[in-house]
Amino acid sequence: MNVYDQAHQLAQAIKESEEFKQFDLYKKQVDANPQIREAVQDFMKKQFEIQAAQMTGQGMDQDMMQQLQQLSAILMQDPTAAQYMQCQMRFSMMMADVYKIIGETADLGFNPLEGMNG
């Protein structure tokens, strides 16, 4: 059994998964709308900054948390953005599970997506 062939099969299975198809569909819709795309990117950037601060042991920046909550509320009012965020979360969860399975098999002892949402 060739590991690289199996990796390519896994990549194909991921592309054919419902999680990926839905994520890709809504990603294309978000990308087609500059206003929504910018808002989603801003939300994800702020979310990443908060997660990075948490991982380094820094305290929670209340202003940034409030901005993130406000931006999330705005995004959830747009059906396309809301669907995209939900699909992105489901796809990320699936990928985290795949990384966990591979990590456990290889006894890597870490998950590169641990603690990340979406």
Image (cartoon, rainbow, N blue to C red):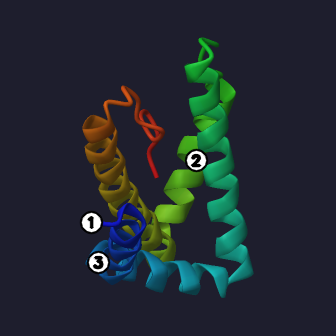
Amino acid type of the residue that numbered disc 2 sits on in the rendered structure: Gln
Residue 103 horizontal/vertical position (percent): 34, 39
**Residue 70, labelled with which disc?**
2
Whichever of callouts 1 and 3 sits on the residue coming sooner in the sequence is 1
Query: Few, some or many C-alpha atoms within 10 Å of disc 3 (few <14, some 14-19, many ≥20)?
Result: some
In this figure, what is the number of numbered marks? Answer: 3
Residue that label 1 marks: 1
Residue that label 3 marks: 17
Q: Nearer the viewer, residue 5 or 109?
A: 5
Q: Is residue 44 left or right of residue 26?
A: right
Residue 63: quarter of image: top right
Element at badge 1?
loop
Residue 90 horizontal/vertical position (percent): 32, 61
Amino acid type of the residue that numbered disc 1 sits on in the rendered structure: Met
Query: Few, some or many C-alpha atoms within 10 Å of disc 1 (few <14, some 14-19, many ≥20)?
Result: few
Amino acid type of the residue that numbered disc 3 sits on in the rendered structure: Ser
Residue furthest to the front in view is 1
Query: Few, some or many C-alpha atoms within 10 Å of disc 2 (few <14, some 14-19, many ≥20)?
Result: few
Q: Nearer the viewer, mark 1 or mark 2?
A: 1
| Mark 2 vs mark 3, CA separation in Å | 32 Å
The answer, for residue 67, to whether it is visible in the render is: no
The answer, for residue 11, to whether it is visible in the render is: yes
| Mark 1 vs mark 3, CA separation in Å | 23 Å
Whichever of callouts 1 and 2 sits on the residue coming sooner in the sequence is 1
Asked if residue 81 is positioned above or below residue 50 in the image, the reply reads below
Asked if residue 20 is positioned above or below residue 88 in the image, the reply reads below
Q: Is residue 35 left or right of residue 10?
A: right
Q: Residue at x 31, y 46 (%)?
A: 102
Q: Nearer the viewer, residue 109 or 43?
A: 109
